[in-house]
Image (cartoon, rainbow, N blue to C red):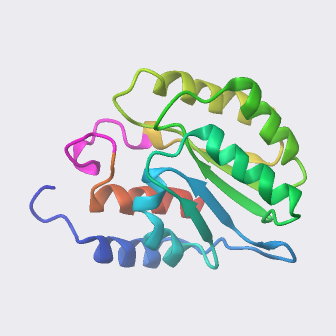
Amino acid sequence: TSAGTASPKAAASAAVSSTPTTGSSTASGVTMGIGDSIMFGSKSALEKVINGIKIDAVVGRQASEAFKIIRQLKASNSLPNTLLLGVGTNGAIDPKDFRAILTDLSGLSRIVLVTNRAPRPWIAGNNKLIAQVAGQFKNVSVVDWFSKSNDDPSLFVKDEIHLSPKGVKLYVSLVGAA
């Protein structure tokens, strides 16, 4: 982290003051985020920016594990009205499974997908898939984290994957505005 970078709490406060609230309230629940360690590391800031969001994010989560959770939520009639999905950092997203899950979620009001950034060989393929498939669904939008975080190493910690406080602030502001 470079000198002068705000603490995570300060970054979250700044994001809160500059980002609109986009939470929803439905019979089946509020906005939900399902993701990997990138979302996990941004959880408290996301909760401050997106009113009522529930986050289910864990370190090392594969897309296939997130899709299982989504299927369980659907089976129990517990899907939120709006879903934030941030997976793909830890491995390739299966195209057939990805299309199937988005088709299953065609009844949701909104699905927000977040592209990936990591020095891993599957990232370019995941991002291409996210962009291509998102365009096939009216209720899907994309936060292009890959492009928005390009050329700014101060957004990341040493591993070039996980977010610095400055990275959390940008990630949350982009997701909150989506």
- Position in image of residue 166 (x %, y %): 29, 59
Task: Pick whichever, 154 or 62, lies toward us.
Answer: 62
- Position in image of residue 39 (x %, y %): 48, 56
- Position in image of residue 174 (x %, y %): 50, 56
Up-down: is 72 above or below 147?
below
- The answer to whether residue 89 of the structure is visible from this angle is yes
Which residues are drawn in magenta? 148-161
- The answer to whether residue 109 of the structure is visible from this angle is no
Residue at 70% from the left image edge and 53% from the top image edge: 69
Examine the residues drawn in magenta and state their main secondary structure: loop
Residue at 74% from the left image edge and 31% from the top image edge: 97
Task: Pick whichever, 75 or 154, lies toward us.
Answer: 75
Residue 152 lies in the magenta stretch: yes
Residue 17 lies in the magenta stretch: no
Task: Pick whichever, 99 or 12, lies toward us.
Answer: 99
- Position in image of residue 6 (x %, y %): 22, 69
Task: Pick whichever, 75 or 155, lies toward us.
Answer: 75
Report whether 32 appears left or right of 162: right
